Image: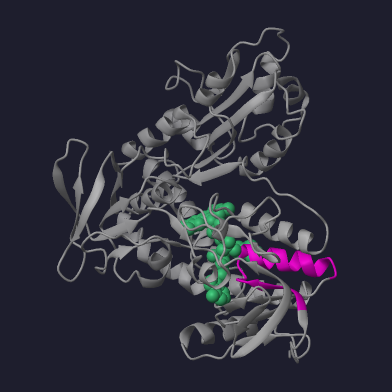
Amino acid sequence: MTDHYLDNAEWQAAIADALERPDSEPMFNLRDDGDVVYDAIWVGGGAAGRFGSAYLRAMGKRPLVIDRWPFLGGSCPHQACVPHHLFSEAAALLDRSRWFSGELFFPEFDESRASILDLVKLFRAGRGSAHAFMNWQTQSQLEVEFILNATAEVVDRNTVRAAGRTFTAENLVLGIGAYQKPLTCPGAELPGVLDWATLVEDLDEEPTRCVIIGGGKVAVEYGSFFQATGCHTTIVSRSPILRTPSLHHVDEGIRRYLLEGMRLRGMTLMEGTSLIAVEGDDRVTGARVRDPDGREITLECDLVFNATGERANSDAVVAALGLQTGSAGEILVDSRMRTNVEGVYAVGDLIGPPMEMFKARKCGMAAARNIAGEPWEFDFSEYPDFLHSTYEVTWVGLSEEEARERYDDVTVIQMPPKGIEHEIPLPCAEGTMLYAFARPELTGLLKCVIDGESRRVLGFHHIGYGAKDAFQYLDYLLRRPEGLTIDELGEMNELFLNPEHFIQLSRLRAGRRELVDL
Ligand code: FAD
Ligand code: KPC
């Protein structure tokens, strides 16, 4: 039972203490002695569990959340999204400092001061404040009951054991996330083999040469960051980079611009190549790979970064409850997040891709609403997406290639226009003005794909900075039954100069009955 509410500083101290001491006690935030039947026990208090339990509480029900970490919020603030954004922001700033080194007001770029280890240490030192806020908000503002620093064991569909006690509920909601699949080749255990989680926990030396295994978002994001600091980076990918099955609607023009940009910045990209072994005696010294011609090559490096994708953390709960799973271990649910076992729901990364925050949080909300008796379905087959290189890359809807396969009359509005890509300083936009004037070829690329017959937009694609917010709303407009037309875009009010030029460019063409490219 909770006798007082902690403030943020107290939470931060309690979390730091719990993380330092393996034998630290569970933390209880219970309204009474917990000897009740909860409406739902949420196993896992990450993005899915925290948002879902808060929603259920807001609907007047009584949820209990249990998490093995001493904080709520899960992997995002601890090891995933938040460090990723810190590193990607640093990558963009480093990139600009390199291109403008010694020009205008920029000092000569001093690579010795660009350190991966320093940024990892900055993150480690600062992440506790986000953790504390998650606990404070959930306790004080959202009034959700929780037990932290306690691994939950699911006994049956109504019963969970944690912190030496047994708790019961009408429903269970499983939101225990996913983990990076370990490499399985020889040498995979050597110090110097890291992934997104272990990088922030274990990095102890400044890497100088890195080999990234994988070709998805994490590979591009961490690779771009490493390279920007001066750690020479090679990406080794079996499939073409950014053509991994977990990513959809990546436009080929966007992909090519990104890959050319990574090469321009000194990265080595090896597609059709697979890892055979990690080499080294007591620490990584190289990665042995097989290239598309079947040749074996050793790439010298002191960091092998595993970005081969994640696997749902489903084994224990599947064994306990007999849950149905898909081919990658993800728990199968319907559009209301119901598993095959009555009263048991699953949410977030545990149910497979897309492994994104919007999906995790909205799955949580979907489970909550259905538990509270409000039938609510969540279809996440279409969604806006983004990644970072040294740019922010955003997209929603069909790529140009997909649109041409499905529609007869496709119009493309893009900047810079096709054929004069390197001749003009456009897009000239917020976030890329310095590039537009000094390095036009670096100003990014944007593209709007339209069905000429219905005049509806099929897809938006953007490389630059500052467009992510707009894409959240563009996604909503595109997914309306009536969609979004070039005419409606032309009638919108742009806040000129803005990062994406979709409104102003649409207005230049919307007057035509027969649409043509721009
Ligand atoms: P988690 O947040 O992983 O929560 C699972 C929780 O379950 C954890 O807190 C864990 O402690 C707990 N748990 C596990 N087992 C037990 C147990 N037995 N008992 C009690 N508790 C248990 N998404 C975005 O939208 N934007 C981004 O920029 C972004 N960046 C990312 C960067 C990286 C490197 C990675 C790997 C992912 C990124 N994601 C991003 C994805 C995002 O982090 C996840 O989709 C999201 O965190 C999933 O939330 P979740 O609640 O499903 O799982
Ligand atoms: C600080 C921050 O908002 C990032 S961590 C979010 C975790 S949660 O709010 O539970 O989705």
Residue at point 65%, 64% (across, down): 341
Out of 1 and 42, give the one closest to the viewer: 42
What stretch of residues is rendered in magenta? Answer: 38-60
- Left or right: 190 as drawn, with respect to 104: left
483, above or below 94, in the image: above
Which quarter of the rendered picture does the N terminus lie within?
bottom right
117, above or below 426, in the image: below
- Left or right: 232 as drawn, with respect to 177: left
412, above or below 515, in the image: below
| The quarter of the displayed image where residue 422 is located | top left
Q: Quadrant of ligand 2?
A: bottom right
Residue at point 37%, 39% (across, down): 241
Residue 476: image location, x then y, percent: 72, 39
| The quarter of the displayed image where residue 347 is located | bottom right
Residue 120: image location, x then y, percent: 42, 66
- Left or right: 5 as drawn, with respect to 360: right
Out of 135 and 346, give the one closest to the viewer: 346
- Left or right: 506 as drawn, with respect to 266: right
Out of 218 and 65, give the one closest to the viewer: 65
Which quarter of the rendered picture does the C terminus lie within?
top right
Out of 375 and 436, give the one closest to the viewer: 375
| The quarter of the displayed image where residue 271 is located | top left
Residue at point 71%, 64% (across, down): 52
Residue at point 67%, 43% (across, down): 472
Q: Look at the image and say whether residue 422 sits in the magenta stretch.
A: no
